[in-house]
Amino acid sequence: VQLQASGGGLVQAGESLRLSCASSGLTLDRVAVVWFRQAPGKEREGVSCVGTYITRYEDSVQGRFTASRNSAKNTVYLQMNGLKPEDTAVYYCAADPVFTNCGTDWAITPYVNWGQGTLVTVSS
């Protein structure tokens, strides 16, 4: 299984980016796909989890970020609008064939498969 995250870049505050998480070897429609981020000097945190029937978001991105799936491309997206400097981080996608949905512990679940990360930098 390989996950590949892409779409990061440098933007100004208030602008948007769309991250992609493409998979080979794992059908993303059947599992929960989670976006994490890690800012310099900070611990990794969960950003969003899109499951087979529920999607969850971390409080600080609720209403600004939207996770979605493209089944035909076996890809999950994270649309990030209204970006803020505090959103600056390396973003990773993760999934695991065992976890099909986003429980309340989605941000601390030990997912097996991880993408390589894509850097998002938001300037003020």
Image: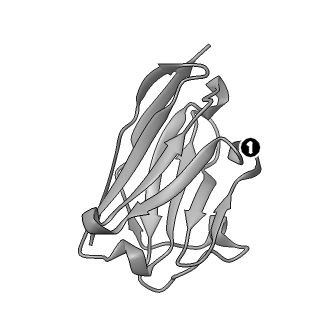
Which residue is located at x 48 percent, y 21 percent? 11
Q: Is residue 52 above or below residue 92?
A: below
Q: In which quadrant of the rendered image does the N terminus lie? A: bottom left
Query: Residue 48: x percent and y percent?
Result: 60, 57
Query: Residue 68: x percent and y percent?
Result: 48, 59
Label 1 amino acid?
Ser
**Left or right placement of residue 50 versus residue 112 in this view:** right
Q: Is residue 63 above or below residue 81?
A: below
The total of numbered circles placed on residues is: 1
Q: In which quadrant of the rendered image does the C terminus lie? A: top right
Q: Considering depth in this image, is 26 or 115 the residue closer to the camera?
A: 26
Say which residue label 1 marks. 60
Query: Residue 101: x percent and y percent?
Result: 57, 79
Direction left: furthest residue: 24
**Left or right placement of residue 85 versus residue 51 in this view:** right
**Left or right placement of residue 105 versus residue 16 in this view:** right
Mark 1 crowdedness (10 Å alpha carbons): few <14, some 14-19, many ≥20: few
Direction top: furthest residue: 124
- Which secondary structure lies at badge 1? helix
Which residue is located at x 59 percent, y 78 percent? 53
